[in-house]
């Protein structure tokens, strides 16, 4: 996504504050795709590549990262550092990753392991944290004090930025509204079978609250198989089955998001990830979340992020700055 106003802010305020005028190579490692981008010194993206994420073998994953960096260096010259936004929680003390959707990352100290392979500094951040930083500093949260970024993609995630600083928390799980066994009762009450989650907990909301969840719920309601964009398109077209499935989905995810919004009282909650591409779904979710809040806010709290497509990449470019 390109926007001249945003680019100016990026250049003048963020790049200067964080001192990254040199070229940066950045990855967004999701449960489905791995996006690679080259950021020029002025904060603009000058090259992007998309590959399927090797989710079954660490060696294949490392090979992809090294290939992309080598290829970019031949064109753009050496990078100051490499940044990765990953669909994993990173323990702030040990640096160990825990990934629900990319199992071979779990238990690895990614900054150290990838730094050794690439022979340079590598900075790694949770994808929702990266997205939240990009939104807070240059996107939908710009100018707000308390920003809670929400990811609804292959998996669910969240990150909290207060006065421009990411809140890392005790164990790296800050803002993770979709993981934890406390959500199991919500599933059972709606007739959904709790599933084991890649984070290691049984009965997380994540398998139902993510884009995969939209597909799962649609299959349960209609006995038909359709991908998330297809379900949302049918829902927008007024289809009965998709309507029932999305109704159940919205009801399910609105509760934990309302708990987060009620507890933190954020100024804004920018939403990113594949599901956030459907603006009407974000509007419906916002309405349901606000209905549950004691504060009865007049203006939207959940909004489509300014960087739904590339917020994680933009946040990863800020890592280690
Ligand atoms: Zn989980």
Image (cartoon, rainbow, N blue to C red):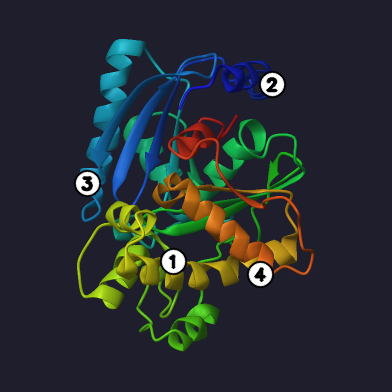
Dots 1, 2 in contact, CB < 8 A = no
Residue at figure coordinates x 63%, y 64% from the top left: 289
Mark toward the viewer: 3 or 1: 1
Q: Which residue is mark 2?
A: 13
Mark toward the viewer: 3 or 2: 2
Q: Crowding at label 1, few (<14), some or many (≥20) Cα neighbours within 10 Å?
A: many
Residue 172 visible in rendering? no
Q: Is residue 3 left or right of residue 235?
A: right
Residue 189 visible in rendering? yes
**Image quarter hosting the C terminus:** top right
The one of 63 and 209 positioned closer to us in this rendering: 209
**Image quarter hosting the N terminus:** top left
Q: Is residue 279 above or below residue 74?
A: below
Q: Earlier in the sequence, mark 3 or mark 2?
A: 2
Q: Earlier in the sequence, mark 1 or mark 4?
A: 1
State how far apart marks 3 and 4 are (Cα).
40 Å
Residue at figure coordinates x 51%, y 36% from the top left: 307
Q: Earlier in the sequence, mark 2 or mark 4?
A: 2
Estimate the x, y position of residue 76 in percent, counting from the top left. Answer: 35, 12
Mark 2: secondary structure:
helix
Q: Which residue is mark 3?
A: 59
Mark toward the viewer: 1 or 2: 1
Estimate the x, y position of residue 273 in percent, counting from the top left. Answer: 44, 48
Q: How many marks?
A: 4
Q: Which residue is mark 1?
A: 209
Q: Earlier in the sequence, mark 1 or mark 2?
A: 2
Mark toward the viewer: 2 or 4: 4
Mark 4: secondary structure:
helix
């Amino acid at each position: 996504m390109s926007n001249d106003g945003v680019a100016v802010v990026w250049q003048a305020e963020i790049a200067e504050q964080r001192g990254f005028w040199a070229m940066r190579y950045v990855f967004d490692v999701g449960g489905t795709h791995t996006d690679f981008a080259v950021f020029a010194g002025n904060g603009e993206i000058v090259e992007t590549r998309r590959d399927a994420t090797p989710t079954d073998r660490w060696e294949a994953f490392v090979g992809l990262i090294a290939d992309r960096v080598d290829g970019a260096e031949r064109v753009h010259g050496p990078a100051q550092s490499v940044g990765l936004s990953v669909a994993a929680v990173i323990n702030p003390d040990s640096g160990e990753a825990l990934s629900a959707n990319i199992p071979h990352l779990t238990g690895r100290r990614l900054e150290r392991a990838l730094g050794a392979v690439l022979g340079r500094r590598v900075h790694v951040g949770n994808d929702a944290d990266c997205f939240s930083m990009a939104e807070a500093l240059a996107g939908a949260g710009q100018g707000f004090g308390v920003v809670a970024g929400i990811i609804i993609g292959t998996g669910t995630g969240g990150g909290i930025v207060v006065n421009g600083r990411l809140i890392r928390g005790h164990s790296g799980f800050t803002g993770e509204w979709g993981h934890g066994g406390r959500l199991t009762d919500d599933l059972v009450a709606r007739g959904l079978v709790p599933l084991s989650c890649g984070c290691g907990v049984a009965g997380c909301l994540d398998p139902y609250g993510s884009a995969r969840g939209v597909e799962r719920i649609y299959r349960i309601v209609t006995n038909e198989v359709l991908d998330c964009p297809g379900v949302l398109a049918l829902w927008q077209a007024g289809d009965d089955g998709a309507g029932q499935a999305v109704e159940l989905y919205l009801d399910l995810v609105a509760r934990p998001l309302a708990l987060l919004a009620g507890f933190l009282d954020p100024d804004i909650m920018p939403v990113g990830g594949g599901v956030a591409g459907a603006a009407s779904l974000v509007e419906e979710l916002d309405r349901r979340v606000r209905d549950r809040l004691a504060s009865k806010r007049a203006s939207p709290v959940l909004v489509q992020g300014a960087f739904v497509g590339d917020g994680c990449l933009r946040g990863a470019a800020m890592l280690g700055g």
